[in-house]
Amino acid sequence: MVMEKLGNSLQDALKKLVKSGRIDEHTVNEVVKDIQRAMLQADVNVKLVMTMSNHIKERAMKEDVPSGMNPREHVIRIVYQELINIIGKGTDIPLKPQKIMMIGLQGSGKTTTTSKLARYFQRKGLRPAVICADTFRPGAYQQLNTLCGKLNVTFYGEEGNPDAVGIVERGLKEVEKYDVIIIDTAGRHSL
């Protein structure tokens, strides 16, 4: 859902670039604003979005256009390269029974990604279940419960219980018959 919307929004931003009469600073700024909007709506970390935006602007205005390319193609290539730098190259996720623990910095999108992964496995014909072990962030339980409810994905959590390890232990017993079990954690404050 969100990834599809992000993809469509990014395509729309690049279509503006393709249709523009000439590539200048104004055009690049407009495209970057559209990309920023799309990524922030998809819950991408603000710092990452700003870093990527600055790189696109700087490279688009300072780099020489390689021979055999026009300015439009060059800017599109820059956007693609910067997106890959942030998102990373794709990897195949095995479609088999497994347990996945979501770890990372707080605020990096683990809870949203948990629901996206659950939906991905669901669409591939597997039966996912989600365990909410984020006992730190207020609203994490409600957010994940709501997202799983919308997707019709089994959810386990213990609202108000601060014992994340105990929640996971009980949750694993509760959802042991599911194909893919995704555990959403509280993450860390910083590296």
Image (cartoon, rainbow, N blue to C red):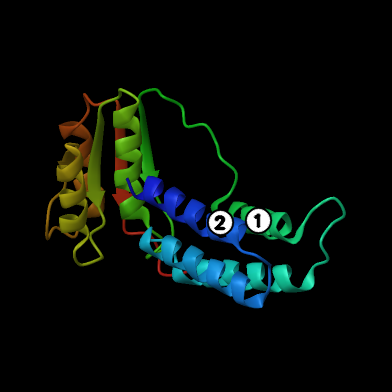
Please indicate, yes or no, whether residue 47 appears anywhere in the rendered image. Answer: yes
The residue that appears at 74% across and 61% down in the rendered structure is 71
Residue under label 1, please give it: 76
The residue that appears at 24% across and 26% down in the rendered structure is 178
Residue under label 2, please give it: 14
> Viewer-proximal residue, 75 or 138?
75
User: Which residue of the protein is positioned furthest toward the front in this rendering?
Assistant: 21
The residue that appears at 16% across and 49% down in the rendered structure is 145
Q: Amino acid at mark 1?
A: Ile
Question: Dot 2 lies on which element?
Answer: helix
Image x and y of residue 95, in percent: 41, 24
Give the spatial CA distance, label 2 vs label 1. 7 Å
Q: Residue 85's image quarter?
A: bottom right
Image x and y of residue 28, in percent: 62, 70
User: Which residue of the protein is positioned furthest toward the bottom in this rendering?
Assistant: 26
Image x and y of residue 170, in percent: 17, 40
Dot 2 and dot 1 residues touching (CB under 8 Å):
yes
In the rendered view, tell whether residue 109 sits above or below residue 132.
below
The residue that appears at 50% across and 63% down in the rendered structure is 35
In the rendered view, tell whether residue 104 sits above or below residue 179.
below
Image x and y of residue 48, in percent: 52, 66
Name the side, left or right, on which 157 lies relative to 33. left
